[in-house]
Amino acid sequence: MARTTGSDGEKTEAAVREAAVSLIARLGYEAMSMRQLAAEVGVQAAALYHYFPTKEDLLFTLMREHMEGLIEAWDAARPAAADPATRLAAYVENHIAFHIERRHSTHVSNMELRSLSHNRLTQILKLRTTYEKELRAILRDGAEAGVFDIEDTGLTAMALIQMMTGVIVWFRPGERLSISEVTATYLSMTMRLVGAKARSATTTDSAERTNDAVAL
Amino acid sequence: MARTTGSDGEKTEAAVREAAVSLIARLGYEAMSMRQLAAEVGVQAAALYHYFPTKEDLLFTLMREHMEGLIEAWDAARPAAADPATRLAAYVENHIAFHIERRHSTHVSNMELRSLSHNRLTQILKLRTTYEKELRAILRDGAEAGVFDIEDTGLTAMALIQMMTGVIVWFRPGERLSISEVTATYLSMTMRLVGAKARSATTTDSAERTNDAVAL
DNA sequence: GCGAGAATAAAACGAACGTTTAATTAATTC
DNA sequence: GAATTAATTAAACGTTCGTTTTATTCTCGC
């Protein structure tokens, strides 16, 4: 009735995070009890409070790290100095790859915002805005350069993000479509949506310009 | 202390539904207590059970009526026998109008599915599928007729629905954009997304075909 | 104006909730 | 190998939850 053999704080905390993401994604934050979470980890409920002071602290930690991970993934994937179409393609590919890989934590970060205190909600939304601004900048650059045809940059950015993030609602690995097929189709839809004019760098854009604008 | 002067079953039930949609949309189903709901209506918690046998029955009723309302709205707005582009435009306009007008119940119907029992979840999903099949049929007809250019009908339908429904996340009446401006932009994005070739019926499609494909 | 049914209030039920306290054992340090 | 610290259990606390029971008052048809 106390410390158990082989117990390890780091391992337990990791197990708690993992189980929490999974349980909150499935049941919802309010519906998941701390006892349920503890049972999933194989521990008593009180042990959870060794790692997270409150249930809301746990939720906030999961969300913050999800958003920070998303921003870091984009920082790593971002092309150095490229034309808007290439940057947009990289953004779409990174967004879809990240969200499919982290379906559960995406679910948590998108659905449980209302369970955060005002301060913490603000912090998460600030991270989200940081990430979304990157897309708006790409769209604006492309529109100014004349390679995109966009009515409203902000509205288009929101539409694209909703469309791309929506993948996690229906996509299941190993079903009809592979990740790369889904990504390719979404990339194609994105390029049409923004009215991308040319394919991008390498292709000879002389012949292609004549017929159709919605390449790739 | 029992029946109060002026009490009326129909009025109370309507007030309960209205307050429930609003509270669940704001707090979430699990986070809303029956006492909170009762207080919002101006009644004791026990009185709610005169109208809905359980909390889940209340949620299910709200969701079912939302989905039925969506299907009925489309049945009323559906153009008789028109070309795919006209039908798609009608679908988009109806979808956005309905979802903006019923933001709260849309939120409830999309976010609280996991609080339903298996049977009831199935019923709601069946209604949703019924509605989404309409869009898939339009896309398929357009693709077969050669007026749309679509890689994957099912995937495109999901992308469009996610994109359109996402309006309720950020749209607030009376802000920067009016409903009709938002609808027009989404219509334009939709037509580009599906690669719509011509404007639709009335226009002379001889001259327009040359230059750009993404009209409207 | 009386009887029946509709609409509610008041109070209580047991269960579950997040969290705290105190005690106990395993691992680590010196 | 003793002292210290880390990790955990067991038990309890007060609160809140969905729901039920019982009783009471209003409304309406006759």
Image: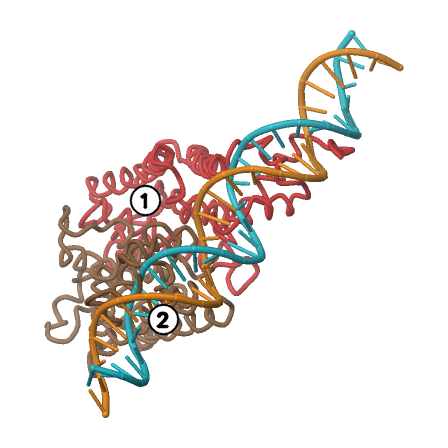
Chain colours: A brown, B red, C orange, D cyan
Dividing the picture into quarters, in which one does residue A22 lie?
Answer: bottom left
Towards the viewer: D2 or B49: D2
Do marks 1 and 2 share a chain? no
Q: Which residue is mark 1?
A: B85
> Circle 2 sits in a helix, a strand or a loop, which is it?
helix
| Residue A106 visible, this angle | no
Q: What is the x, y in percent for residue A41? A: 27, 58
* Label 2 crowd bin: few (<14), some (14–19), many (20+), radius 10 Å: some
Q: Is residue B192 left or right of residue A116?
A: left
Tell me the kind of residue under disc 1. Ala
Tell me the kind of residue under disc 2. Arg
Q: Chain of mark 2?
A: A
Towards the viewer: C24 or A96: C24
Q: What is the x, y in percent for residue B98? A: 47, 44
The vertical placement of B76 against B174, above or below, is above
> Circle 1 sits in a helix, a strand or a loop, which is it?
helix
**Residue drawn where x is 18% and y is 50% of the image:** B151
Q: Is residue B126 left or right of residue C22?
A: left
Q: What is the x, y in percent for residue B165? A: 40, 51
Q: How many marks?
A: 2
**Residue drawn where x is 48% and y is 47% of the image:** B29
* Quadrant of the snapshot with the N terminus of chain B: top right
Q: Which residue is mark 2?
A: A64
**Residue drawn where x is 43% and y is 53% of the image:** A30
Q: What is the x, y in percent for residue C17? A: 45, 53
Q: Chain of mark 1?
A: B
Residue depth check, mark 1 versus mark 2: number of the one nearer the observer: 2
Towards the viewer: B208 or B61: B61
Dividing the picture into quarters, in which one does residue A151 lie?
Answer: bottom left
